[in-house]
Amino acid sequence: MAPHTEQLTRPAVRLRGLTRSFGGRTVLDGIDLDLPAGQFTALLGHSGSGKSTLLRAVAGLDQGVAGSGELSAPERVSVVFQDSRLLPWRRVLENVVLGLDGKDAYDRGRAALEEVGLGGRERAWPGELSGGEAQRAALARSLVREPELLLADEPFGALDALTRIKMHHLLRELWKRHRPSVLLVTHDVDEAIALADRVLVLEQGRVGVDLAIDHTHSRDEYRTRLLAALGVTEDPA
Amino acid sequence: MTAATDTTTTTDTPNTNGSATPDTPDTPDTPDTPTTPDTLAAPDTPGVSADPAAAPAGTAPAAVAEETRRVRPRRRLSPGKRLPAARLAGPLVFLAAWAVASAAGQLDPNAIPAPWTVLDTAVHLWTGGTLRTDILTSVERAAYGFAIGLTAGVLLALVSGLTRTGEALIDGTVQINRAIPTLGLIPLFILWLGIGETFKVAIIAIVVYIPVYLNTHAALSAIDSRYVELAEVLDLSKLQFVRQIVIPGALPGFFVGLRLGVTGSWLGLVVLEQINATSGLGYMMFQAQNYGRSDIILVGLLIYGVFGLVTDTVVRVIERRVLSWRRTLSS
């Protein structure tokens, strides 16, 4: 197992020669990567390219997976999953403050819900929320822990297109306000360009493309490049 | 508008092949959508006529379809609104039938005495006889056995569900215990514990703990591993994990076991008190049998029934409160 130690100096996440394999198949093949503190990074790749494996390794969720390498990540890491993963038997506010202690936990939870636009829904059951609302609550649950690193594994993959656009704005806003380092795993090229300052493409277990995004620049160029890196040519029309 | 009327109306159209049976599927999708989208079905399927509800016969199908497009109400698959006092309705009808038959002299009063005779006997036994002590003795046995069985079932399920060692030691043992009919243990338990109260409580406890254990353990093992992962990500302590995820996640299964256990405790009691007792409701009924007093037997049966109904209702009410987050068919 790779050590999961705290590092006080920058960068926020540091990977050296990170290797992971499942049943003899190498999924991550000696990845070297630094994620500076406060940077919004998107990680693209085909299904099965190892995006989620990388994220789970950084999250410390890969006990029992064969691998080697050096890995350091901050102490406070929050994860947002593709499903909201709210406990159906706890009300929304209780889900947000799950595992927090301290007298002000509920106040902080309420503030976080307010921030994601769910003020007033504290007493709702998760089953009563829409998909977008549930994912907002999941974001609030991550934020309330004041993470230094926010890991998001296709957090908007199950949402409809309109809700997804709203969530993009929300996530970008929250990031600007709280400035955690973000590693967003996605298969959506447009989402990656719209949200991130840096886009990585994972190819055969290695970082194939490492692209800095300038948001004043035209998105089409990035899009073409990233799609090409993913082996997709845009429709001839 | 029901499906049946819709389909029968369609049979008086140019179509001839489906005339005999009203529910013959003319189109492959008829069973699901009897009045299928009028606009779509009418032109291309000769078997189904234009909107049967609104179109007068003879009008051009296409024109009608344009005008009368409306939302077809979906077939309700949930049972619908609950009837008032639904759970009492059946027993009350039964009671009424019993009373009417007795009053009409249709029942042999020695075999099945009238309800008022039974009531009279009950009052008599309560004021002048041993009914109070008998009830108290029975309730005490059931309560002790139930409490012990419930505690044991929950604790064993928790240990077995949360630790691999516990699972290895406990689960197989309980499965074997389950395969042995508990009432078959009575002779052995009498030899071990004597014919007093202890063995009765022990048997009831065994009858109760098995369903509680089985259902709680099954629910524990079925807790979604995604929630376990969530607990890891949120750095929950073992205690928080059990309190926030394990116990609430296993509660639905626990309640299934609890209701079976409650019923089981009364069931065990009836058997024990009729075979091996010198007091209690079952003993009272056993004595009544010797004297041919069917009214006393019925009093005993009624009390057992009322106890069963009341305890089950109590468990249901608690269940509905505790599991209010679940929205199910019964809500």
Image (tube, helix red, strand yellow):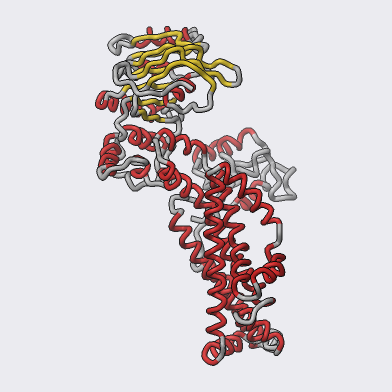
Q: Nearer the viewer, residue A58 or A195?
A: A58
Where residue B79 sits, quadrant-wise, is bottom right
Evaluate whether residue A166 shows in this view. no
Determine the residue positioned at 63% across, 66% down: B203
For residue B308, side relative to residue B232 (left or right): right
Q: Position of residue B330 (x, y in %)?
A: 52, 56
- Name the residue located 38 percent from the left edge and 7 percent from the top edge: A221
Q: Is residue B231 above or below residue B178?
A: above
Give the image quarter of residue A225.
Answer: top left
Residue found at the far bottom of this picture? B128
Residue shown at 39% from the left, 34% from the top:
A135
Measured as percent of width and height from the top left, residue B201 is found at 59, 69
Q: For residue A82, which quarter of the picture?
A: top left
- The answer to which of A221 and B180 lies nearer the viewer is B180
Residue name at image x 30 percent, y 24 percent: A180
**How far across and down, in percent of the image, does residue A22 sit?**
57, 21
On screen, residue B212 versus residue A8, left or right, reads right
Q: Nearer the viewer, residue B241 or A159?
A: B241
Instruction: Point out the residue furthest to the front here.
Output: B192
Q: Is residue A137 above or below residue B153?
A: above
- Rendered position, B190 above or below B59: below
